[in-house]
Image (spheres, rainbow, N blue to C red):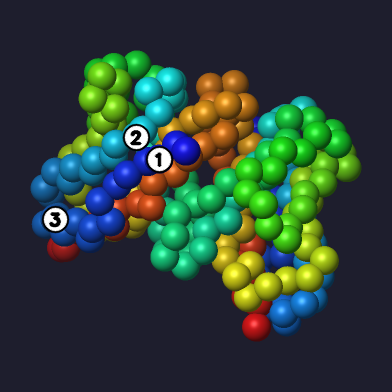
Amino acid sequence: QKEVEQNSGPLSVPEGAIASLNCTYSDRGSQSFFWYRQYSGKSPELIMSIYSNGDKEDGRFTAQLNKASQYVSLLIRDSQPSDSATYLCAVSGGYSTLTFGKGTMLLVSP
Amino acid sequence: SQTIHQWPATLVQPVGSPLSLECTVEGTSNPNLYWYRQAAGRGLQLLFYSVGIGQISSEVPQNLSASRPQDRQFILSSKKLLLSDSGFYLCAWVTKYDEQFFGPGTRLTVL
């Protein structure tokens, strides 16, 4: 059974700091990796996708993938209170189905 | 652009009652569609997916069923709800890059 593991947190960082969120996965054959942000009571919102080893940057967000270590991470630079949410790591499988981690709660204090 | 709709937004149902949740997608044709459930304290769990009209794959055995009567319509049903069916039900479609986008969800409370 495919597994995706995340630290549940909460991860607390001050405003302006870098938040680092981590994720490990069990299926070595996985090809596509995603980070979603979910505010309380809302549906998940896709913020980053990554498909090859290395870093991918989009604004304040950087996703990092290391397939050999089966490790995905998300860095949020210049964290803002509006970034406070639960961040879900997801890994794709057959027919583009996704296996999700349970999420890491991020709290950014002003 | 693509839009995904779900209704109702919230639902409170008694144990043993039937359920029908609807999901429709606009702006794309023949999308793969997915139903997920997010229960309190648990992660997002894939329930069903469909690659076309009438084609349903079930990931988790339970008292729920799904149907896809039209290309852009995906329905989640139950004949008799259990307390354990409470949760946040999410429908999603996928792009050619494996990126899934979610609808606004239906929050179901079974009493």
Chain letter for the residue marked with disc 1 in the picture: A
How far apart are labels 3 and 1 at the CA level? Answer: 27 Å
* Residues packed near mark 2 inside 10 Å, few (<14), some (14 to 19) or many (20 plus): many
Q: Nearer the viewer, residue A107 or A93?
A: A93
Q: Which residue is rendered at x = 57% and y = 66% of the image? A: B87
Question: Which residue is label 3 attached to?
Answer: A13
Q: Position of residue B53 (x, y in %)?
A: 84, 34
Q: Are marks 3 and 2 on the same chain?
A: yes
Image quarter for residue A78? top left
Q: With A54 as the anchor, is A36 left or right in this view?
A: right
- Mark 2, residue position: A25
Q: Which tag is nearer the camera, tag 3 or tag 2?
A: 2
Q: Badge 3 sits on which subunit?
A: A
Q: Residues within 10 Å of mark 3 (few under 14, many from 20)?
A: some
Residue B11: x and y in percent read 69, 73
Q: Secondary structure at mark 1?
A: loop
Residue at screen point 73% across, 50% down:
B23
Query: For the residue marked with disc 2, what is the amino acid?
Result: Tyr
Judging by the rendered image, the residue that carries numbered circle 1 is A3
Instruction: Name which of mark 1 and mark 2 comes first in the sequence.
Output: 1
Q: Is residue A33 above or below residue B13?
A: above
